[in-house]
Amino acid sequence: MTFVVIARYRTSPGAEHTVLPLLDTMAAASRKEPGNLAYRVHQGTADPRTIVLYEEYASEADFTAHCASPHFQEIVLGTVVPLLESRDVLRCTPRPEVDA
């Protein structure tokens, strides 16, 4: 079973122009990690200050390793988080598919 992370960021006013390129760099590095199945950056259409990350890993351990990576520590924690007004991270696992 995979492990999914959905993070919702709300940037400080005007910071989305700085945050988005950093998250593009983060996505490229994260996609190369063992166990990473997907990493997508989405920007709100009604509110461009809202950014949603969709990340999928083969296991929770792979996500934990991702959080310990130098690029996560430097880019997300060191640079992006200080530019945010809010940050919510939802960790979940997909429900098994059921035939109707």
Image: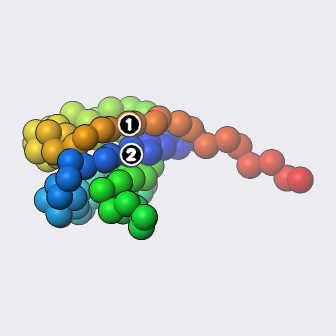
Instruction: Determine which quarter of the picture holds residue 48.
Output: bottom left
Residue situated in front as seen by the camera: 14 or 56:
14
**Amino acid residing under circle 2:** Arg
- Can residue 25 be seen here? The reply is no
Q: Earlier in the sequence, mark 2 or mark 1?
A: 2
Q: Residue at x 39, y 44 (%)?
A: 7
Q: Is residue 67 left or right of residue 3?
A: left
**Amino acid residing under circle 1:** Asp
Q: Marks 2 and 1: CB-CB under 8 Å?
A: yes
Instruction: Determine which quarter of the picture holds residue 40.
Output: bottom left
Mark number displayed over residue 8: 2
Q: Is residue 59 above or below residue 29?
A: above
SS state under label 1: strand
Residue situated in front as seen by the camera: 89 or 57:
89
Residue 70, given in percent of the width and then of the height, sits at 13, 41
Q: Which residue is mark 1?
A: 88
Q: Is residue 67 left or right of residue 93?
A: left
Q: Is residue 95 above or below residue 55?
A: above
Mark 2 crowdedness (10 Å alpha carbons): few <14, some 14-19, many ≥20:
some
Q: Is residue 7 above or below residue 17?
A: above
Q: Residue at x 27, y 53 (%)?
A: 30
Mark number displayed over residue 76: none
Q: Residue at x 25, y 40 (%)?
A: 85
Q: Quadrant of the N terminus?
A: top right
Mark 1 crowdedness (10 Å alpha carbons): few <14, some 14-19, many ≥20:
few
Q: Residue at x 30, y 56 (%)?
A: 49
